[in-house]
Amino acid sequence: MFDPTAFDNMKVVIEGAFYDFDLSGEIIITDRNDIINMAKMSRSFDLSFQLPAGSVTAKIEMESKLVNLAAELLPNSLPEKLAGSYVKLQFFLELLDTSADFQAIETIFLDIWGEKRKITQSIEYNPLDKPRKIKNTITLDFERIIGEEQMDDLIEMADFMVTTMEKLQAFVTPENRG
């Protein structure tokens, strides 16, 4: 038996929070990956989900690199603040081409997540489509390592992700667009 790392403990908490939402019927988990990269000695985990009757999907990604593991296992050789994982959130939706939508989406994220997070939107579209449908990927990056001491924040993050998806779904639903 081995002593679980911060990555392992955080992954279990994240999975538990989202599977509770799945069991209650609030979301549907659509994909899950748990990857160990032996060449780089890194771990990554991601979980994708959507609302039961929605088109918006979301993904939470967590990654721990060799330096993060080393900081945890060899605390005297590396700063303890490096122990933990990087967490990135992504939301995927499709909408018609209007630049006003991007600002409205930004406002939704700022209202829920605050201004301290890095929020980026990237779009993909076929220029020959009429009307032009845009696939928008909104990424929320915390730009820092999340450690075990923020375990409660991970559970709260799951709640915020579901709330964000509900707001985005209401935004892209045609009858709500007027």
Image (tube, rainbow, N blue to C red):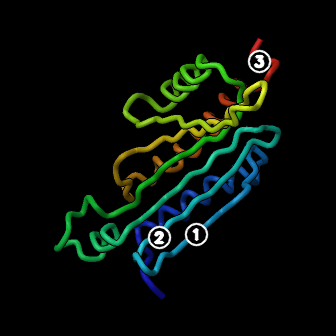
Q: Is residue 22 above or below residue 157?
A: below
| Marking on residue 149 | none
In terms of secondary structure, where does tag 2 sit? strand
> Mark 3 highlights which residue?
176
Residue 169 in view: no
Q: Nearer the viewer, residue 128 or 175?
A: 128
Q: Amino acid at mark 1?
A: Asp
Hey, which residue is sitting farthest left in the picture?
76
Please rate how many residues cluster around mark 1, counting C-alpha atoms within 10 Å: few if below 14, some from 14 to 19, many from 20. Answer: few
Q: Is residue 16 above or below residue 59?
A: below
Q: Determine the CA span between mark 1 and mark 2.
A: 8 Å
Q: Amino acid at mark 2?
A: Arg
- Location of residue 58 by image quarter: top right
In terms of secondary structure, where does tag 1 sit? strand
Q: Determine the CA span between mark 1 and mark 3.
A: 37 Å
Q: Earlier in the sequence, mark 1 or mark 3?
A: 1
| Marking on residue 34 | 1
| In-image side of 139 versus 40 (left or right) | right
Q: Earlier in the sequence, mark 2 or mark 3?
A: 2
Hey, which residue is sitting farthest bottom in the picture?
1
**Marks 1 and 2 in Cβ contact (< 8 Å):** yes
Q: Residue at x 52, y 22 (%)?
A: 107
- Location of residue 104 by image quarter: top right
